[in-house]
Image (cartoon, rainbow, N blue to C red):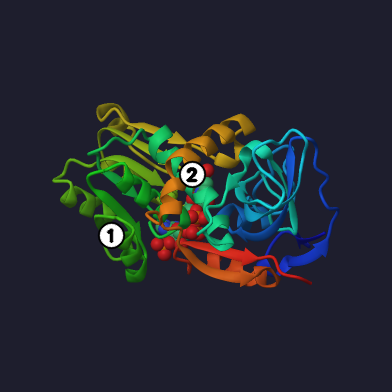
Amino acid sequence: MRAVQVTKPGSADNLTIGTVDKPVPNDTDLLVKVHSFALNRMDIMQRDGKYPVPPGASPILGVEFSGTVETAGSKTSKIKVGDRICGLLGGGCYAEYVLVPADLAIPIPDNVSFEKAAAFPEAQFTAYQSLFWINNLQEGEDVLIHAGASGVGLAAIQLAKWKKAKRIIATAGTESKLNHCKSHGATHAINYKSEDFKDKVAEITDRRGVDCIVDFIGGSYWNSNVASLARDGRMCMLGFLGGMKVETDLSPLLLKRLKIEGSTLRSRDEHYQAKLRAAVVRDVLPMLAAGTLDVKVDRVFDWKDVADAHKHMEANSNEGKIVCNVTAA
Ligand SMILES: NC(=O)c1ccc[n+]([C@@H]2O[C@H](COP(=O)([O-])OP(=O)(O)OC[C@H]3O[C@@H](n4cnc5c(N)ncnc54)[C@H](OP(=O)(O)O)[C@@H]3O)[C@@H](O)[C@H]2O)c1
């Protein structure tokens, strides 16, 4: 089969479509013909040689896909050949075919396109896990969501709204991105490039701070994030777009009784992923089917232009998700 290959670690121009062995399914697997895959930041790090592939995962880039089931193992009962599914995997999605453990498959609602379906799993799983399982966001609480117009950011804004959070404060770097945050449910949107988000959060919350933060930025935001948390505040750290080193005063962690937890979804085992999948299918998929939850697709590329798709993400140009369609040779 054809698959995107990294000729050598480094620039997006080192991505090329080559030929690899088609995966061989076992009894519990589905073999899926991929229609679309979506990009994630970790793909760029992996391409660059800076993201270790989890043990047992395909070395091919890509963790989320949509497509049609071509063969179903004898121990897969619920999904049939010909079904449209999407899902989140440890890797291997930048390819014509993927192997999908049957209990990780997500049925695509009839009214949802392959492109939107490919862009659904990673952002929704990450946002759901960080808001509800890690940050334990409760109805009526205030939440701060950084990189608000990112795929994960827009998912988190909508899930916080569904949970009936009181103030949903998002940060982003352009006016257009701030508008997207607001149209998806943010009650306040802060341009972190022209305003100090710590001061704005204090102003918006009458100096109380927020109950929860979803952070992808890390080092450069650490001190302002800690200052923005209310007493008993929680923060989930999902990335280090702003660096990994901090110089800080630790006293607020004790005085405000803060809880700070990091997570990477890709490193979770199949049992955890299946539990999270079940929760997202139960709570979030019906909103997608009903059209009350938007999966914002920023741009769809032909996979032959995957290098341009990577460059688009590296330039922080996307509002929502970037998707590639797998097309004929
Ligand atoms: N740990 C996990 O399990 C997990 C899972 C999925 C994703 N993630 C992480 O979540 C983040 C969002 O993922 P995504 O795929 O949704 O990203 P994305 O769509 O590529 O968006 C990331 C956005 O972050 C903002 N940004 C970049 N560098 C920044 C900086 N130094 N300071 C402030 N803002 C910055 C940019 O928007 P502006 O124009 O607004 O600056 C950029 O468009 C990534 O860091 C990704 O690695 C983590």
In the image, what residue type sits under mark 1?
Ile
Point out the frontmost of discs 1 and 2: 2
Of residues 60 and 324, the one nearer the viewer is 324
Q: Position of residue 112 (x, y in %)?
A: 51, 59
Marks 1 and 2, the one that precedes in the sequence: 2
Q: Is residue 43 visible?
A: yes
User: Which residue is painted at 24% across and 56% down in the image?
Assistant: 188
Residue at the disc numbered 1: 190
User: In the picture, which quadrant includes the N terminus?
Assistant: bottom right
Q: CB at mark 2 closer than 8 A to ligand 1?
A: yes
In the image, what residue type sits under mark 2?
Thr
Q: Position of residue 296 (x, y in %)?
A: 45, 62
Of residues 209 and 275, the one nearer the viewer is 275
User: In the picture, which quadrant includes the C terminus?
Assistant: bottom right
Q: Is residue 224 visible?
A: no
Is 176 on the left-hand or right-hand side of 119? left
Q: Position of residue 94 (x, y in %)?
A: 70, 58
User: Which residue is painted at 61% across and 71% down in the image?
Assistant: 301
Q: Position of residue 134 (x, y in %)?
A: 42, 33
Q: Quadrant of residue 14?
A: bottom right
Residue at the disc numbered 2: 126
Q: Secondary structure beneath disc 1?
A: strand
- How far apart are the two marked residues, 1 and 2, measured between alpha carbons? 22 Å
Is 166 on the left-hand or right-hand side of 234? left
Of residues 261 and 117, the one nearer the viewer is 117
Relative vertical location of residue 9 with respect to residue 90 in this rendering, above or below: below
Q: Secondary structure beneath disc 2?
A: helix
